[in-house]
Image (cartoon, rainbow, N blue to C red):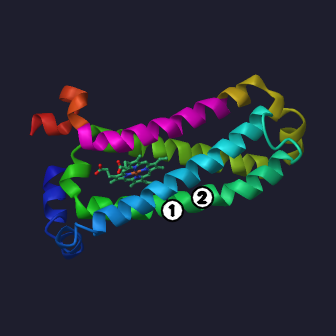
Amino acid sequence: MKQFADWLSTTSPSVFIQEHNTWAIPAIQSIHIVGIALVMGSVLMIDLRILGWAGTDQTLRQTTSRFGPWLTGSLWLMLATGILMVIGEPVRELVTFSFWLKMTLVAVGALVAVIFQRTLRRHDPQWEDALVQRGSIKAMAVFTFFVWAFIIVLGRLIAYDHIWGSWSPAATQ
Ligand code: HEM
């Protein structure tokens, strides 16, 4: 991975970002951070509806139809800005434990969101009448919220990967 990161840092898109890093990285990072608000806002609204703590004047389907596209759109935005940051600083990103754990959890969170939206579309009445009342579904809503919150922590920890000790690939370089 270090070899790949070294090679990536010599490619022209990476060199372009490195040469303009006084504004390019902060600008990309700022968009990435706006994306966090959109992801967390939409996840929170859907989770609060599942818990029955907000939006109960709307059906679960109405709530997910409203916030689901924001979640999907903001995840694409985060993927695009995240890839640009990786291209700009490949070694800093790819040779860290925090980055790979974060990517794994982003994949898990996105998969859970896709499965949830698909099953809700297919089995709408069961979800509205019974499934949303189940303790296990409510627990899942709380759990997924904390997974997204942990992803935020891991995003910040990329810059402090030494805290993982020998788990950090940087420690063995
Ligand atoms: C979808 C794929 C994503 C990719 C490829 C990606 C990639 C990155 C990269 C490369 C950084 C720069 C880290 C550094 O150099 O310090 C970063 C920062 C960060 N990311 Fe992501 N990210 C993604 C999604 C997310 C999501 C979904 C969240 C939160 C819900 C998130 C939260 C953060 C945070 C909090 C930071 C630190 C920002 C800062 O301290 O300036 N990222 N991300």
Location of residue 132 in the rendering, given as x and y in whole percent from the top left corner? 81, 34
How much space separates mark 1 and mark 2, taking CA atoms?
A: 6 Å
Q: Amino acid at mark 2?
A: Thr
Location of residue 98 in the rendering, given as x and y in whole percent from the top left corner? 32, 39
Location of residue 164 in the rendering, given as x and y in whole percent from the top left corner? 25, 29
> Residue 159 in magenta?
yes
Label ID, residue 72: 2
Secondary structure category for the residue under label 2: helix
User: Residue at point 25% right, 50% down?
Assistant: 94
Secondary structure category for the residue under label 1: helix
Is 107 placed above or below 75 here?
A: above
Could you tell me what secondary structure mostly forms the magenta stretch? helix
Of residues 37 and 68, which is closer to you in this image? 37
Decide if residue 126 is on the left or right side of residue 91: right
Decide if residue 100 is on the left or right side of residue 170: right
Asked if the residues shown at circle 1 and circle 2 are in contact, with their CB atoms under 8 angstroms apart, the answer is: yes
What is the total number of numbered labels drawn onto the structure image? 2
Which span of residues is magenta-colored?
140-160
Q: Amino acid at mark 1?
A: Trp
User: Residue at point 18% right, 27% down?
Assistant: 166
Can residue 122 be seen by looking at this rendering?
A: no
| Residue indicated by mark 1 | 76
Badge 2 density bin: few <14, some 14–19, many ≥20, Cα 10 Å: some
User: Residue at point 26% right, 50% down?
Assistant: 93
Q: Is mark 2 within 8 Å of ligand 1?
A: no
Location of residue 46 in the rendering, given as x and y in whole percent from the top left corner? 71, 44
> Residue 30 in magenta?
no
Can residue 47 be seen by looking at this rendering?
A: yes
Residue extending furthest toward the left: 173
Badge 1 density bin: few <14, some 14–19, many ≥20, Cα 10 Å: few
State which quadrant residue 126 falls in: top right
Q: Quadrant of the C terminus?
A: top left
